[in-house]
Image: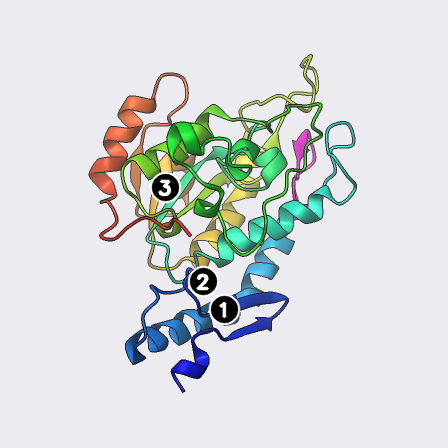
Amino acid sequence: MIFAIQNLSFTVYGHEYMKSEDSGLVDPSDNCFSLFLFCLQLQTRIHSLPVISNFIQSLNSQPAGPLFNPWYDRDCEHDDSPGAPEIRRLQFQSYLQERIGRAKYLLIAEALGYQGGHFTGIAMTSERILLGHQEDKYGVKPVHVFKEREPIRTSKVEVNRKGMSEPTATIMWGALIGLGIDPYEVVLWNAVPWHPYDPDSKRGILSNRTPVQKEMEAGLTLLRRFLELFEGAKPIAVGRKCEQSLSELGIDHEQVRHPANGGAPKFRKQLKEIVPPSRGELTNR
């Protein structure tokens, strides 16, 4: 039976799972304990699929105002195709799904930015990371973000040939990999899940602004729902805005400096003190 199941592959809710060396579910090993762990982790993922789907659906309700919703809005000027929002939803779903049952830390910042989540749908994650353009310099690979689907850019090539690059994303992922932290034990999120932009800016929708109070308040319910997805994981506020949101919800948490505007060295130092390196090798599959 064990031999027959080594390369078992099947599909649940449109997701294919395989017990093989590149499955990422467990370390490959021809023994019963490996198979037992595989089944437990797979069961957790299967049961969480509808929950994650419902969570993503709940993001389709933002307050009025200049907010871009990457999972349901199309950036007609800069998106590569009408299917861009769906691509971002699916990639975000894979990102969350692959961390269910594994995540130990939740790094939560302020809001999505136009160089990051605007086009990926994933907090503090840029297209340049998904496309593999930060592997040589920072050691960050696309498979560190998700493995179950091929990453696809959603911005037009004319916007940026190599894909958009966000300083915060570069520092965040560079720190995780540089400190030896397993990226599948960390989930990135924002107190305001959408992208606040300044319509009066010369760059229009490709701009960032600080969220206003009503936007912070609208994010509270979703922040709580996000925390419930990863019950038992430790929340870490990245910057003061998220710290305020977590405190308002009465959630115990750690806090680190936001890496932007010269905060990278302190951010790395504080992160290293809170999150220990992974005991094994990082997920490189």
- Looking at the image, which residue is at 58% across and 53% down? 149
Q: Relative to residue 221, is residue 266 drawn left or right?
A: left
How far apart, in angstroms, are the residues tagged by discs 3 and 1?
Answer: 41 Å
Density class for disc 2 (Cα within 10 Å; few <14, some 14-19, many ≥20) is some
Residue at the bottom extreme? 1
Q: Are marks 2 and 1 in contact (CB under 8 Å)?
A: yes
Disc 2 to disc 1, C-alpha distance: 6 Å
Residue holding disc 2: 23
Q: Which mark is in front, 3 or 1?
A: 1
Q: What amino acid is found at the position of numbered circle 2 in the picture? A: Ser
Task: Name the residue tied to disc 3.
Answer: 247
Residue range of the region highlighted in magenta in the rendering: 60-71
Residue 66 location, quadrant: top right
Q: Main secondary structure of the magenta part?
A: loop
x, y percent for residue 229: 46, 58
Q: Which residue is mark 1?
A: 18
Mark number, residue 172: none
Name the one closer to the observer, 22 or 50. Answer: 22
> Residue 184: where, in percent of width, then height?
39, 51
Q: Please state which of residues 135 and 243 is positioned toward the viewer in this rendering.
A: 135
**Residue 198 vs residue 138, the one in the foreground:** 138
Question: In this rendering, is residue 146 above or below 62?
Answer: below
- The answer, for residue 94, to whether it is visible in the render is yes
